[in-house]
Amino acid sequence: MAMDDVREPLKSRKFRRCRSAPLAEHVPLETTNTGSVPVTESIFRNLHPSFRKVGIFLAFYLGIGTICFYLVRNQIKGEKTNGVLDAVYFCIVTMTTVGYGDLVPNSVLSKLLACAFVFTGMALVGLILSKAADYLVEKQEKLLAKALHMHQKVGHIQVLKDVETNSLKYKCIVAFILLLVLISAGTIFLATVEKLDLVDAFYCVCSTITTLGYGDKSFSTQAGRVFAIFWILTSTICLAQFFLYIAELNSQSRQRALVKWVLSRRTTNLDLEAADLDGDGVVGAAEFIIYKLKEMGKISQEDIRLVMEEFEDLDVDQSGTLSISDIVLAQPPSTEK
Amino acid sequence: MAMDDVREPLKSRKFRRCRSAPLAEHVPLETTNTGSVPVTESIFRNLHPSFRKVGIFLAFYLGIGTICFYLVRNQIKGEKTNGVLDAVYFCIVTMTTVGYGDLVPNSVLSKLLACAFVFTGMALVGLILSKAADYLVEKQEKLLAKALHMHQKVGHIQVLKDVETNSLKYKCIVAFILLLVLISAGTIFLATVEKLDLVDAFYCVCSTITTLGYGDKSFSTQAGRVFAIFWILTSTICLAQFFLYIAELNSQSRQRALVKWVLSRRTTNLDLEAADLDGDGVVGAAEFIIYKLKEMGKISQEDIRLVMEEFEDLDVDQSGTLSISDIVLAQPPSTEK
C-alpha cells in the first residue's frame, strides 16, 4: 500500500476514474417498505441491519420464550431463583446453546419446547444477531483506527482508506479487545458475586463463551442470573464473530496472494489474445481489466455474459460501442410518467 | 435462466468469449510444496481442502486430547465406562461444544485442559472441518442434481450448469437430507441402545446437534459412547453447515435481486459518461461490463485501480491499447533461463 501511495502522484493518470454509478438512488430491494420510509433509507437498512428490527426480533423471541418457560416452570427442574428471571435465563442459555443443565426440562411438553427454542434461537443468533454484531464492530473499528493514527499526521481520508484496506484486521482487534473485556468482567463477577475461586470462575467463563456449558459451574444466584442474561448473549456472539473474522482474514490473505501473483506475472501473447474481447487485435484498458479480474476470480464468465447481453441489446447500430444515439434508439422514452 | 437459454441461439454473438486465463498452470500459492507434488495438484489441494491434511489435524487433536484426558482421568468425575473411550468421548463432547456435563473436570489441571481444548477444538471445527464438510456436500450435490434430472432428457453439461447456478440450493437440500438421516439414526440409536423413550431420545438428539447439551440425557453406555464419537461430530457440523447455507442463500438472493435491477434499469447519458473509462466519448463493450459489474458490487474501484496501474506500465507507447510490441518492450526477456 505504501508503494501505491508513493507512485500515485508521480505518474500522470491518463484514464479517468470510472465514476460510481448512481446506485444509492433507486435500488428497489426492499419491497415491503412502509410507505413513510424514503427509499434511500430503506437501502441503508438493507446494508446495515436495522437495529430496531433486530431489537424487535430479539424482544419477540425472548418475550415468547419467557412466557412459555414461565408457564411450564413446574416442569423444569433444577436450581431456581425468581420465576420470570429463571425463564429469561433459561431462554438465553438455550438460544445461545450454552445449555448448562442447571435448569432442565422435565416433561414431554417442556422438552419439546426447549427443542423448538434452541433451533429458532440458533437461527436468530446466527442469521440476525451476528449481522448486527458485525455492524457494531464495524463502527468501532473506525474509532480504533482513528485512535491508532492519532500520533501520526494523517488526514481523515487516509484513516478511512486504511480502515477499508485492513478492515478485517481491525475487526479482529476490536472483537479481541471486546472479548478480553467480557472474559475479565465475567471472571471478576463470578469470583465476587457467585463466590467461585479464580480458576473455577475462569473455567466457567470459558465453558460459557464457547457455549460448551458443562454446567458444573453456572449462575445460581439471582444477581448472577441477571448478569448472565446480558453477558452470555454478548460474549458468545463476540467469540463467534472473532472466529468468523479469523476465517475471513485467512481467505482474504489467500485472495490477496492470488491478486498479487496475477498482477506480477508476465503478460504473454496468449494473454493478449485471450483478453481481446472485441477481437480488434489490440487490448484496451477495459478489456485488460476484465481479463485480469477474471483471472483473480473476482468475476465470472457468467457475470460477463449477462452484461454483454444487455450491451448488445443497447448497441442498436451494432458498432461495438454505445453512444447517446444508441441508448435513445434502444430505450424509447417511457410513456408512463 | 430459461430465457437466456432461449435467446442464446437466436442472437448472433459478435463478441468472443473472454477466454479463461491459464490460471491452473502456475499459481504459486502453496509455497511449502513437497518437491514431488506437481504444482497443479497443489492448487487443487488449496482450493479443495485436502482430506489427508484435515484427517491428520483431527487425528492429531484427538490423539493429544485423548492422551491428556486419559492421564487426568481420575480428575474427571461422572459416569464412566472405559478409560480410553471416555477420554475420546470427552474430547469430542468438548471440541464440538456440546458439553453434556456427564463427565466434568474436577481439578485445576483438568479444568484448564478443558478450556484449552474447547478453544482449539472450536477453531478446528470452525476453520478446518467445516471446509472439508462443505467440499463433501459439494460432491454430493452433483449426484443429487443428476438424480433429479434423471427423468429429463438433459445433457451432462446442462446438469453441471444447473448445479453451478443453483449450487447453494442443492447444498441446502443435501445438508437437510443428511440432517434428517442423522437425526433419525441418533433417535433410533438412543431409543434402542440407551433405552430412552422416544421423546427423550429426540430431545437428546436436538440437544446434541445444536451443541446445547443440557446433559440430563446423554450417552452413558460403552456402545453409546462409541456411536456418539462419530455421530456427534458429523451431526453438529452438518447442522452448522445447514445454517451457513441458509445464510448464504439469503445473501445470494439479495445479490441476484441487485444484479437483476442493474441489468434492467434504463441506461442514461450520465451512465454512458461515467462508464467511459478511456474518455473517447463512446462506451465499448468492456467499459460497459466494468461499469455494470461495479454497480453490482462485484468489483471495486480499488480492483480497477490496481489492474489499471499494471496496464499503464505495460502500455509503453501510451496508445491506450496493448499490442505485442508493447509487452515485448515493457517486459524485457528474462536472462535467467
Image: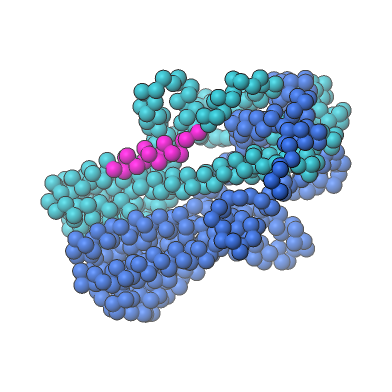
Chain colours: A cyan, B blue
The quarter of the displayed image where residue B134 is located: bottom right
Position of residue B213 relative to residue A283, above or below, is: below
Towards the viewer: B335 or A39: B335
Does the magenta segment cover residue A59?
A: no
Q: Residue B308: image x %, image y %?
A: 67, 30
Image quarter in which the C terminus of chain A is found? top right
Position of residue A217 relative to residue B7, above or below, is: below
Taking the image as shown, residue A300 lies to the left or right of residue A228, namely right
Towards the viewer: A179 or A158: A158
Residue drawn 46% across the image and 31% down it: A163
- The answer to whether residue B64 shows anywhere in this view is yes
Magenta-tinted stretch: A165-180
The quarter of the displayed image where residue B302 is located: top right
The dominant secondary structure in magenta is: helix
The quarter of the displayed image where residue B198 is located: bottom left
Q: Residue B142: image x %, image y %?
A: 65, 62
Position of residue A119 relative to residue A295, above or below, is: below
Residue drawn 75% across the image and 28% down it: B316
Towards the viewer: B237 or B287: B287
Taking the image as shown, residue B190 lies to the left or right of residue B329, namely left
Residue drawn 77% across the image and 21% down it: B280
Q: Residue A309: image x %, image y %?
A: 77, 38
Residue drawn 52% across the image and 44% down it: A253
